[in-house]
Amino acid sequence: MKCRKMVSLLMAGVIASGMLAGCGSGSGSGADSQTQAPAGTAQGESGSQATAEEEVTLHLFGPGLLSTVGENGSIDLISGLEMPGYQVIVDRWNELHPNVKLVIEAQPWDNWQAAIQTAVLSGDVDIIMHGASLADLDEPLDPYLEKEPELLEQIYTVAQRRTDATGDMSVMTSTGMSYAMNPMMCILDKQIFDHYGLELPDASWTWADLVELGKKMTGTDPVTGEQTWGIRMTQTDSVGNRYFNYQMIASAYDAKAFFYGKTLQECSADLTGEKTTRVFQTIADIAECLSPDVREGINVSKTISAENQFAIQWEQDPFNRYNEIKACGGEDRFVLMTMPVIEEGDLKGSPSLFMGDHNMSICNTSKNKEWAWEFLKFMVTDEVVTDWVTGCMQLPNNREGMDRVKNQMGEKFSAPMVTALEKSPVGFSNSTNDYFNNVSFGSVTADTGNAIGEILMGNMKAEEAGPYIQKNIDEYLQSKK
């Protein structure tokens, strides 16, 4: 029923909400659908119709996984494993479409947004790597998805945003295709739990359960006599990313704070409510379980190792977390767990919301949009690409690909990852959702990060955080009227 609901919304013209549940099992990935040329233009007159005989060059520009591994591959420093280079993608594409040449300009993360904007102005970019968040540069994918709704049966999600570039911020727009997924996951140290005589939680645990366990395991290990810390919260060393924690907890409490109209002038926000204060209070409670370096966000070690002191910690990139666990011989010691559950609202029972990704988008000035769309589909359905993604230690955005992950690491570690992917709403946007928006409301991201930092250091009370952030939001929205 969930897939049918998603498809029907697409056929209506837009995906009216990014908060839909995930699709059921799909038909699997494969290259057969990639061997034929595009049949026409989903956008009417936008872009030229492609044919199998024409000579085309697709220009890809931006950062992401391709820049991480490079053309010829790289070595993962933790596991010592070799990650394949993006030449694998080029060779496979050339095998299927010899008339369409790929030109890849993989960029570093430094000043990546400015670099993309400059490149797009040159008029020579077809596909923007990691471009889904730059909605004003992207061709909306919803018309393409309307024509091929079966694609949603094969993958877990599409990249969506609320953007004024479409003239309506009240709806979610599909701005890109995620080809690798990075759900936030908890890593539990079973050894520390055992030493304190505590049972591991199951996937139905709540944030209150997490805090209670964290407090019990902050102290002197009864067996080793060494200091342990109950919790390591993610991204405390990044003001711009501390909101990850706020958003997850807010989703658990259904603390909706951002409200959308067609234009920014019709949008509003309220971070002063009871539920929002509860989110900040949970962060204050977590602070009691953090080590000084984590609380201060200075010299934070994030690598899972045999010297681990944290009973509960959470990070993205679970494939690499697994590799760290394996590298330190910790397969029996460490457990992966989905984030605490959402307690209220339509998604009650699902893990708290945060999903990172590697994505690509179609540049809205491209003259080869149909071939660009073919390439985006290729990145999420082709078996060779799926093997490349898993070889780069990422979770692929297709269902059969996760079977490959299971074969690589076993049921114990892969099952929680599959659960996180299956239960994440299709098209959920970390950037523009009902719980947080780090795009359209002025300095809210920095203000939230600063407020969380002050709470962690004991310099701000939970009930003071919301009004502190709200003041600047109100001033910003007023300036836009």
Image: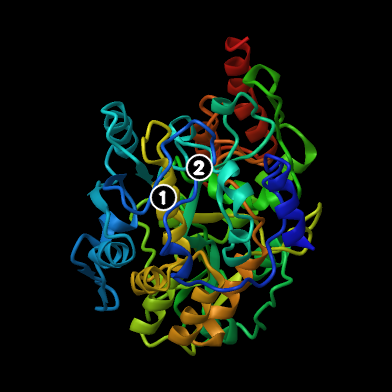
Residue 281 visible in the picture: no
**Percent from the top left, x then y, of residue 195?**
56, 86
Q: Report the residue at 34% width, 65% height from top.
A: 96
Residue sitting nearer the eye, 257 or 370: 370
**Percent from the top left, x then y, of residue 473?**
61, 23
Q: Quadrant of residue 267?
A: top right
**Percent from the top left, x then y, of residue 356?**
49, 55
Q: Amino acid at mark 1?
A: Gly
Above-or-below relation of 78 to 137: below
Q: Is residue 369 left or right of residue 104?
A: right
Residue 453 got which mark? 2
Above-or-below relation of 64 to 410: above
**Percent from the top left, x then y, of residue 216?**
64, 71
Q: Is residue 432 left or right of residue 443?
A: right
Q: How is the image coloured?
A: rainbow
Q: Quadrant of residue 338?
A: bottom right
Q: How many marks?
A: 2
Residue sitting at the far left: 72
Residue sitting nearer the eye, 459 or 262: 262
- The residues tagged by marks 2 and 1 sit, at their Cα atoms, a distance apart of 8 Å
Q: Amino acid at mark 2?
A: Gly
Q: Report the residue at 58% width, 10% height from top.
A: 479
Above-or-below relation of 276 to 356: above
Q: Quadrant of the N terminus?
A: bottom right
Q: Report the residue at 42% width, 41% height from top.
A: 369
| Mark found first going from the N terminus, 2 or 1 | 1
Secondary structure under badge 1? loop
Secondary structure under badge 2? helix
Residue 297 got which mark? 1
Q: Are marks 2 and 1 in contact (CB under 8 Å)?
A: yes
Mark 1 Cα-neighbour bin, 10 Å: few <14, some 14–19, many ≥20: some
